[in-house]
Image (cartoon, rainbow, N blue to C red):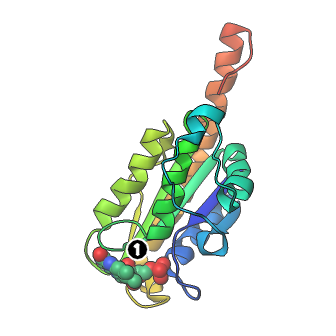
Amino acid sequence: MKIVYISGSPRKKDSNTDYLLNLIRSVTGGEFIKLIHHRIAPCNACRGCLKHSSCKIDDDFTNLLTPVLLEADAVIVGSPVHFNNVSSQLKAFIDRTWSLRGKLRNKIGGAVVVGKRYGAESAITAIHAFFLKHEMIPANRGVCGMAFNPGEIKTDAEAMASATKLGERILELEKLTHRGAENYVSKKGGGYHV
Ligand SMILES: Cc1cc2nc3c(=O)[nH]c(=O)nc-3n(C[C@H](O)[C@H](O)[C@H](O)COP(=O)(O)O)c2cc1C
């Protein structure tokens, strides 16, 4: 299974979001992508993707991240809570996936947010809305960590336990969805269309 982890935290060192994402990754394995290391322009609503079925902006989202997303079986998305929402880096990424409509269907999604106190639920909802728009399969209700300073998340035992559970749930869903595909093929006797 190919799993990609997307971090929307702009914090370069000891990011709380990265810590939880990497905890899940220690259960499942997978590739880690930090959005600040890539050039990702915001969607400019040019509607080029309606005509050409790909994004016309020439940057890392189109050239590097799109192929990774298309190949992934599961996409785990993390963000710090910024003004009761996801970070602007993650929002730009989410908006750009409009160009991939229909192509992320049935991939497994996992959500992680970390905030000091307010707005974690709204941030998780924004990530789950992204999954649902693409008809992805949210693994569970996501992980909400409480932390403010760099690395402080290590004191949130509940968030760390939830992260491990999310990793286990992703592995479980992966087995289930593969079994589903086998059943579909044997019943219909044909190929399985994702
Ligand atoms: C611009 C900005 C806005 C923030 N807004 C919120 C907020 O609305 N609610 C909250 O609980 N924490 C807020 N925080 C605190 C961060 O969510 C918190 O420091 C978090 O641990 C950062 O995670 P990271 O280390 O992964 O970047 C904000 C921080 C910044 C820089």
Amino acid type at image mark 1: Val
At 60% from the left edge and 74% from the top edge, which residue is drawn? Answer: 36
> Which residue is label 1 attached to?
114
Name the residue located 55 percent from the left edge and 87 percent from the top edge: 14
Q: Quadrant of ligand 1?
A: bottom left
Image location of residue 151, percent across then percent down: 50, 88
Q: Nearer the viewer, residue 64 or 126?
A: 64
For label 1, the crowd category at 10 Å Cα-Cα, with few meaning under 14, some 14 to 19 and many 20 or more, is many
The C terminus appears in which quarter of the rendering? top right
Image x and y of residue 78, in percent: 50, 65
Q: Is residue 65 above or below residue 157?
A: above
At which x and y percent is residue 127?
42, 55
Q: Is residue 61 visible?
A: yes
Give the camera-side residue of 32 and 43: 43
| Label 1 beta carbon less than 8 Å to ligand 1 | yes
Nearest the eye: 88 or 107? 88
- Inspect this view and state whether residue 104 appears: no
